[in-house]
Image (cartoon, grey):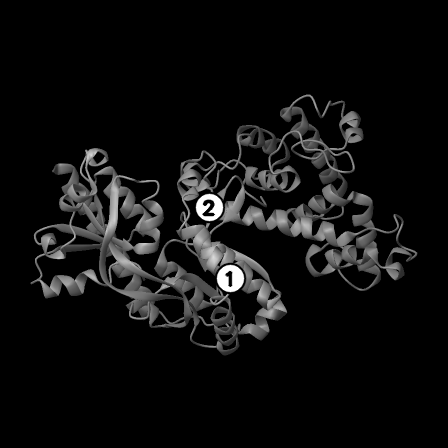
Amino acid sequence: MIKKLLLSAIIVTAACAAWIYNKSLTNREPDIKTMDLDKIRERGKLIAVTDFNSTDYFIYKGTPMGFNYELLNSFSDFLGLDLEIVGENNIYRAQEMVRTGEADLLASGLVSDHDGNRALLLSSPVDRSNNVLVQRKPSDWKNQTDSSLEKSVIRDLRLLKGKLVYTGENSSAGTGIFSINKEIGGDITIIKVPFDSEKLIKLVASGEIDYAVCDGNVAQVNSTYYPCIDVKTIIGEPFDLSWCVRKENSGLLISELNRWINSYRLSDSYAMLHAKYFNNSWSSVIVKSDFYSLRTGKVSKYDDLIRKFSSHINWDWRLLASLICQESQFHPDVVSGTGAYGLMQVMPVTGRTFGIDIKSSPENNIKAGILYIEWLNALFTPKIPDRRERLNFILASYNAGPGHVFDAMRLAEKNGMDPMKWEGNVALWLARKSEPQYYNDAVVRNGYFRGLESVRFVTEVMGRFGHYRNIIPEEKSRPYGE
């Protein structure tokens, strides 16, 4: 009893703090950026904020996944833009990011009658859901028949009279329980808390609280790995879920977003995507895995080695993990068509240069790759003083070899661009090294090269690193760029 009272006090205090924070956002004048779609195209990338959980956005075995994640990738492909995703589970902070221009789009399930959404411009519906009551089954539920089990859980919502029910203070959960409480005389004690549906479901499953009202889609998925909970009691009518943009300066963006949504929702691709994340028993396998990063912070069984060796080159371990995932998907014995071997796809000649047998162990393979990165860093430090910028050149050289990157730097300088900047400068000229008029240029010393693959390599490694940073807690030892 004391434990539950303490939990309630903590939750109520947090809820009050979230309410005050939300009111402060509502009263604050937004610093609106003039970033409609035309300006976003000039920038070259779409910045979207979304929540991270076991359905919308997560990392499994080092790979970003999720319903919103895949939808956002499809939308950015539709626009022909790169995509940057920011993970944010505080709905008020996420809304503020859109209002002030930190993000162009909020990809989270929003409902039209939620107070916090009225200052935003909602899209056409991307999904449909409902609210459900999350409750525990009796302790001996495995031994009960279906009929006896039905009698032991609440199906008639009037039986919630005198009960304590928690609901998330977010955009989609809890909208129906207040109406039902009014209909039955207001005898349900409802506490709104700044928790997402997954956290509330976990509290019910663990016995910390008895009842919660949550988003039905999320509850259905969670029930596959919390079989002790019941999520079949529906509360209220189904409702549409939308994304949102700023109300100001977003006419072109919302028009294209709605055009894409209205077409994509009718496609087989959407149906398969929805089934993949909301009607698939493998969700429980993912969440229980050691490599479900939201729960464990792990991406592979080599994380300890990656942490150890990242410190030698002063890298954030998550960046090195992203590079290894790109090279080998964490498979220690993979061999490329050119003979590169192992986790870091080190060439045998490179290993011999550093006196290492790259096939002797995963540790030695990583060690050889680290020594090569160390050598590349020494090579580029005099030329690229900015460390963040230099990382792009090191990654490109890890894939292409430094000679081709130096060629691209010389081409950039010759054509009036900055040879010390990657994006839009050296990257552009490395991609052009497959064209005769450029690989035959007098400043080019290493000839033809399919540079576009190396440009993509850098983009994908750094993009995955961004996902790791969104979801896996930062470690203080080697922060990125410092």
Measured along the vertical axis of the image, is residue 278 above or below residue 341? below
Left or right: where 450 falls relative to 69: right
Measured along the vertical axis of the image, is residue 256 above or below residue 318? below
Query: Label 2 crowding class (10 Å Cα cut-off): few <14, some 14-19, many 20+?
Result: many
Callout 2 secondary element:
helix
Q: Which mark is residue 268?
A: 1
Q: Which mark is residue 471?
A: 2
Between the C-alphas of marks 1 and 2, the distance is 30 Å
Front residue (pair 427, 460): 460
Percent across and percent down for residue 233 are 22, 53
Measured along the vertical axis of the image, is residue 106 above or below residue 311? below
In the picture, residue 24 is in which quadrant? bottom left
Number of marks in the image? 2
Left or right: where 7 falls relative to 368: left
Left or right: where 232 falls relative to 322: left
* Image quarter (top left, top right, bottom left or bottom right) of the C terminus: top right
Marked residue nearer the N-terminal end (1 or 2): 1
Front residue (pair 292, 137): 137
In the picture, residue 17 is in which quadrant? bottom left
Residue at point 74% right, 39% down? Answer: 376
Measured along the vertical axis of the image, is residue 10 above or below residue 44? above
Residue at point 48% right, 41% down? Answer: 474
The amino acid type found where label 2 is placed reads Ile
* Residue 168 in view: no
Query: Label 1 crowding class (10 Å Cα cut-off): few <14, some 14-19, many 20+?
Result: few
The amino acid type found where label 1 is placed reads Asp
* Image quarter (top left, top right, bottom left or bottom right) of the N terminus: top left
* Residue 279 in view: yes
Front residue (pair 434, 141): 141
Q: Residue 320 carries which label?
A: none
Percent across and percent down for residue 255 are 50, 76
Q: Do the residues labelled 1 and 2 touch (CB within 8 Å)?
A: no
